[in-house]
Image (tube, rainbow, N blue to C red):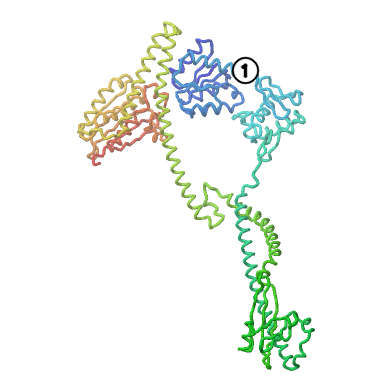
């Protein structure tokens, strides 16, 4: 048995006739609801599914089929006029086994049906799922663990199959319940837990492969998610490098500054000590004479003591032999002491590693006492401390590395938690508010642009798909019936019926092409449209005359009232607008109903109105009836020959003439549609 879901009656009957003449049994359905009812009675071997259907579309029905345990393995062929790559990918990824675009040949259609049925039978025999040493064969309905067969009930088998098909993914209890037991199952999720426990017991050691994810559901084969522990590595590196540079510079500069200050302080104390020492020795010499100086004086102090005569001759030196020393009369400190009573001088060694402070003071007998002390220079003092400084920096860097990693995690954690779609909801750092504000504005702008693009693209795709579908549907009927007739597959008693269908479909195709051309002209707005003085009362009479026969066939009372009303407009566009609205009223009014047309003026402005007591339009649909190819009742519209473009032409014509369309409708009571022209614009 093959089920065919197609809302076009001619195509549905064509496909069923072709299948039956080639040896298959087939049933046809006009929508998804009829299919679902039939599936409760019998499961077919194949389902042919159109996409553009009244109610749920083909994609939605396909998703429902693949979620039903009893039907999910039944092959599905999408039979549609939608030929875009996106539609094909969507259908095939949704579970369809093949995708046929209209129009197509009947022989090719039968060949594809046979190929899918063969492939389906072979797949059911060969399909095998496994994890670790657990194997499940779908075709033979067998389960083995370590080559030992495990006997399972049908539901246990389907449960294990579902988990293996979604290996590594956590399946919620509701997902399992809907997939294995079906959407219409009234049981609780407790049912899943009971079956999982029983399944584990039967699998024995393999039961441990079914993992319970607390609070969620079950899975087989956990997928390890190796997270990158160094996601913030770049930030840590930058923080560490910048902080390290700052710390090193701070330590060095602090060390240099502190060292210089301490050295200068020490230098001051040292010089003052030398001065004080010279004052003590001066006092001793002036009271005790030269006997105060002896060789032992040099051992009592680290300073060098020198006594000079008034001619600069060295009389005593605590370190060297005076007789071997040169005359010091040219020394700056001696000259200054001779003139001012005291003098001092600092001289550096050739390598700048040492510095000597000389202090000279003049005695009462005009002799000069000089005291000198040698110390390391500032440069040597700093260099000798660099080892200590290096050790200190290393210790600081180690501590810094630990603190930077810890603080970086704390720093970036709230940043990582920022919701980039709603950045201003939780601002972790006020410093980031300007950035997040701009990000929020950008998000809004991008979202608006995406919505606009999406709407425009969706409208374009929908229009293209609808045009393709509406054109291919009658072509499919024409070519299909013609192919059957050409190949001698139609008995003589059906020839006239099939020829009539070809004629009606060709007429429908012609009307559709005419409407598309008319709509395309209105879309262009290229300035070539010529406005002229038009009497819409006269146009109204022409419309009534042309539709009188159609109304008479349905025994509809077509009433016209009104009179002349002049306006500036495009004659053929105004005629199309009035004709389409009146024609729609006749199409959707039951036999014996009433359609009233008024053409004239309202409040001094040109005015057109059509009222009927037909099927009416639901309020939820009233905003969409002017969309291209949109039909409130698709099946009824096609049966009456509607193209789905009539009211769209009316809308474009209203825009062209600066008119307002008013709609008042109630299902079961009828519809009133008014057009009020504003000639002031």
Q: Provide residue 435's location: percent of width, then percent of height.
A: 50, 53
User: Nearest the camera: 54 or 210?
Assistant: 210
Q: Residue furthest top?
A: 492
Q: Quadrant of the N terminus?
A: top right
Q: Picture quarter containing residue 563?
A: top left
Q: Quadrant of residue 204?
A: top right
In the foreground, 378 or 59: 378
Query: Is 391 displayed left or right of 66 in the figure?
Result: right
Rendering coords of residue 652 (x, y %): 32, 33
Q: Position of residue 623 (x, y in %)?
A: 39, 36
Relative height, residue 237 to residue 460 (above, below): below
Q: Which quadrant: the C terminus? A: top left
Q: Residues within 10 Å of mark 1 (few under 14, many from 20)?
A: few
| Rendered view: 567 above or below 62 | below
The local secondary structure at tag 1 comes to helix
Query: Circle 1 sits on which residue?
Result: 122
Name the outermost residue toward the right: 296
Q: Quadrant of residue 175?
A: top right
Is residue 490 placed above or below 413 in the rendered structure? above
Towards the viewer: 614 or 627: 627
Please state the horizontal and vertical placement of residue 143, each as a whole percent of the image: 72, 24
The one of 522 and 643 positioned closer to us in this rendering = 522
Relative horizontal placement of residue 428, taking residue 612 as reference (left or right): right
Task: Tell me what residue is drawn at x 62 percent, y 54 percent.
Answer: 408
**Left or right of 205 in this view: 575:** left
**Residue at the spot 61% in from the left edge and 26% down from the top edge:** 69
Count of numbered circles on the image: 1
């Amino acid at each position: 048995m093959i089920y065919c879901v197609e809302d076009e009656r001619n195509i549905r009957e064509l496909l069923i006739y072709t299948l039956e003449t080639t040896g298959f049994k087939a049933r046809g359905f006009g929508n998804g609801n009829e299919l679902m009812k039939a599936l409760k009675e019998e499961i077919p071997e194949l389902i042919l599914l159109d996409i553009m259907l009244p109610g749920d579309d083909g994609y939605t029905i396909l998703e429902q089929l693949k979620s039903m345990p009893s039907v999910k393995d039944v092959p599905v062929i999408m039979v549609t006029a939608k030929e875009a790559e996106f539609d094909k990918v969507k259908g095939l990824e949704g579970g369809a086994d093949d995708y046929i675009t209209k129009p197509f040949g009947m022989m090719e259609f039968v060949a594809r049906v046979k190929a899918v049925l063969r492939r389906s039978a072979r797949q059911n025999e060969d399909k095998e799922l496994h994890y670790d040493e657990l194997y499940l064969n779908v075709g033979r309905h067998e389960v083995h663990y370590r080559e030992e067969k495990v006997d399972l009930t049908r539901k246990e088998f389907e449960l294990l199959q579902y988990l293996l098909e979604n290996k590594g993914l956590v399946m919620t209890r509701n997902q399992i319940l809907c997939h294995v037991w079906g959407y219409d199952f009234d049981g609780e999720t407790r049912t899943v837990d009971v079956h999982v426990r029983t399944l584990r017991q039967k699998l024995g050691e393999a039961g441990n492969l079914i993992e319970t994810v607390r609070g969620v559901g079950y899975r087989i084969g956990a997928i390890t998610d190796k997270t990158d522990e160094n996601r913030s590595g770049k930030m840590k590196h930058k923080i560490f490098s910048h902080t390290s540079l700052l710390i090193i510079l701070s330590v060095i500069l602090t060390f240099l500054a502190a060292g210089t200050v301490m050295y200068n302080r020490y230098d001051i104390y040292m010089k003052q000590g030398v001065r004080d020492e010279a004052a003590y020795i001066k006092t001793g010499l002036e009271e005790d004479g030269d006997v105060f100086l002896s060789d032992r004086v040099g051992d009592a102090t680290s300073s060098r003591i020198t006594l000079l005569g008034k001619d600069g001759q060295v009389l005593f030196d605590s370190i060297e032999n005076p007789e071997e020393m040169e005359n010091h009369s040219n020394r700056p400190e001696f000259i200054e002491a001779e003139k001012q009573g005291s003098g001092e001088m600092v001289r550096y060694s050739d390598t700048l590693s040492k510095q000597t402070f000389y202090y000279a003071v003049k005695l009462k007998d005009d002799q000069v006492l000089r005291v000198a002390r040698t110390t390391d220079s500032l440069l040597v003092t700093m260099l000798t401390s660099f080892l200590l400084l290096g050790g200190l920096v290393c210790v600081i860097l180690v501590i810094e590395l630990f603190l930077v990693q810890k603080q970086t995690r704390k720093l970036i954690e709230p940043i990582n938690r920022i919701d980039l779609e709603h950045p201003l909801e939780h601002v972790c750092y006020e410093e980031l508010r300007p950035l997040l504000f701009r990000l929020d504005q950008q998000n809004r702008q991008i979202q608006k642009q995406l919505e606009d693009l999406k709407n425009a693209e969706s409208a374009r795709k929908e229009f293209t798909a609808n045009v393709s579908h509406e054109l291919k549907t009658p072509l499919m009927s024409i070519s299909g019936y013609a192919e059957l007739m050409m190949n001698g597959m139609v008995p003589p008693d059906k020839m006239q019926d099939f020829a009539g269908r070809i004629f009606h479909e060709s007429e429908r195709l012609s009307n559709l092409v005419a409407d598309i051309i008319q709509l395309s002209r209105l879309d262009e707005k290229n300035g070539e449209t010529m406005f002229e003085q038009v009497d819409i009362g006269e146009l109204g009479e022409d419309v009534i005359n042309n539709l009188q026969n159609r109304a008479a066939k349905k025994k509809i009372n077509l009433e016209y009232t009104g009179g002349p009303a002049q306006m500036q407009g495009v004659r053929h566009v105004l005629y199309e607008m009035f004709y389409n609205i009146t024609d729609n009223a006749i199409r959707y009014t039951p036999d014996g109903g009433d359609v009233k047309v008024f053409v004239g003026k309202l409040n001094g402005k040109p005015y057109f109105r059509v009222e009927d007591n037909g099927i009416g339009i639901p309020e939820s649909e009233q905003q969409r009836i002017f969309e291209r190819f949109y039909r409130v009742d698709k099946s009824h519209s096609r049966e009456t020959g509607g193209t789905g473009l009539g009211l769209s032409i009316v809308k474009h014509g209203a825009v062209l003439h600066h008119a307002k369309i008013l709609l008042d409708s109630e299902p079961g009571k009828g519809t009133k549609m008014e057009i009020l022209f504003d000639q002031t614009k």
